[in-house]
Amino acid sequence: MKLHTKILLGLLAGAVVGVATNLTVGVDHPAVEFINTYLAVPVGQVFLRMLFMVVMPLVFASITLGVAGLGDIRKVGRIGGKTLGYFFVTTALAATLGLTVVNVVKPWERVSPETRTQLMEQFSTDAEGRVQAAATTARFGPDTFVNIVPRNPVDAAARTDMLGIIFFGLMFGAALTLIPAARAKPMIDVLEALSDVVIQIINFAMRLAPYGVACLIFTVSSRFGFDLLYAVAAFVLTVLAALVLHLTITISAIVRFVLGLSPVVFFSRVKAVMITAFSTSSSNATLPTSLNAAETQLGVSRHIAGFVLPLGATMCMNGTSIFEGITVIFLAQIFGVDLSIFQMGIVMVMAVVTAIGAAGVPGGSIPLLVGILVMFGVPGEAIAIVLGVDRILDMSRTTVNVTTDLTATIWIAKTEGHWTPRSLPQA
């Protein structure tokens, strides 16, 4: 049985048993309290802690390698600069769209005030410290920018200061590009090994995920019944709607007015790539199909596609930024963490930056999402509410990610004078 099927079954089993328990014996029954105290909560916490422990090394390794992989930043050149600019602009547009949609739909309103109060009471011990630590993000001023630069990166990692680690990773990666390649290579090898090790640890954690999700969902649903599950369904529909809107409005507008190509023609030429991305949930696994489609279906030269697409598989995560932004807002509102307009702006920035650092493998964005939740004072247990339904969302956001990568290759080729709509091969 595939892992994502096991996770979904774990979600369903935990939800069904939890709701049935809530409707029959009630949450105050001694047997329910015993199961929650000695089984469900400990197993769920072990799973969560395995995710928490890889957040900081994953962020540091991903950001550093992303910058170092560009080569000498003084010589990255015109194509590299335009490619990164395109990635940042489209990812920012995607994150903005996601935050707009979630604030219009407001899926958290499906949770009753009584359930929100109970959630805050249940997780009050964990939440209070996190909310106080996150309160500084609500204040805007000179200190907001000063505090991005960590005095001690190790201390920043211990405090789960994501912005501090991201800044340190950017500086570390930039410095690696400015020293002789022979001196930089051993450190890059270490960072690549660190990244590989962290991804393997994530794989270990995801093997525990079916049981961790079942236990965490049982703990929540046995206390709150159908109320919370109804909100999760609204959350899933909100994310899917935002992803579809990004493809049909933002990306289609770019294809039509920037690339000068019919969106119908474009999507028909890349449908094999979209199907591969949807079925594998991995930008990296889709890369061979993307390279082939760029050359044979879109008429992009091999050297441009070979530069842009591998970079995009790591750094262009439009769909991931939509998912992360909506998820943070949704869970923050459910757990009573009210975010100001400025904080929502920070959510957008973090969604863009961490999406760029997300591993191009199934579930690669989950540890980074956990880090953002903690940063904004949301209890770690909140991730369980959405983790069980993440598979369909992961498949969908990966499809958006790789489709945007292909528009980037066309745009780069067009601005370099190597592509026009006439360059399309004959169907």
Image (cartoon, rainbow, N blue to C red):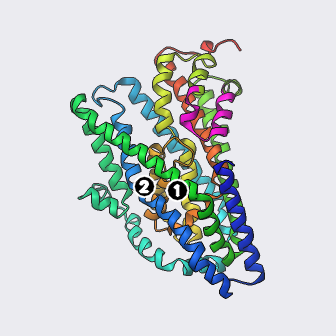
| Marks 2 and 1, the one that precedes in the sequence | 2
**Residue type at the position of mark 1:** Ala
What residue is shown at x 55% (from left), y 46% (from top)?
Answer: 320
Left or right of 52? Residue 254 is right
**Measured from the top left, where is residue 74 in percent x and y?**
27, 28
**Measured from the top left, where is residue 379 in percent x and y?**
50, 69
Mark 1, residue position: 205
2 or 1: mark nearer the eye:
1
Proximity of marks 2 and 1: CB atoms separated by less than 8 Å: yes
What residue is shown at x 61% (from left), y 41% (from top)?
Answer: 281
Is 13 within the magenta?
A: no
What residue is shown at x 67% (from left), y 68% (from top)?
Answer: 109
379, above or below 427, in the image: below
What residue is shown at x 35% (from left), y 37% (from top)?
Answer: 67
Residue 28 in sight: no
Q: Is label 2 in a helix, a strand or a loop?
A: helix
22, above or below 322, in the image: below
Neighbour tally class for label 1: few under 14, some 14-19, many 20 plus, Cα within 10 Å: some
Left or right of 25? Residue 306 is left
Left or right of 145? Residue 414 is right
393, above or below 298, in the image: below
Which region is colored magenta?
Answer: 270-288
Mark 2, residue position: 54
**Residue type at the position of mark 2:** Val
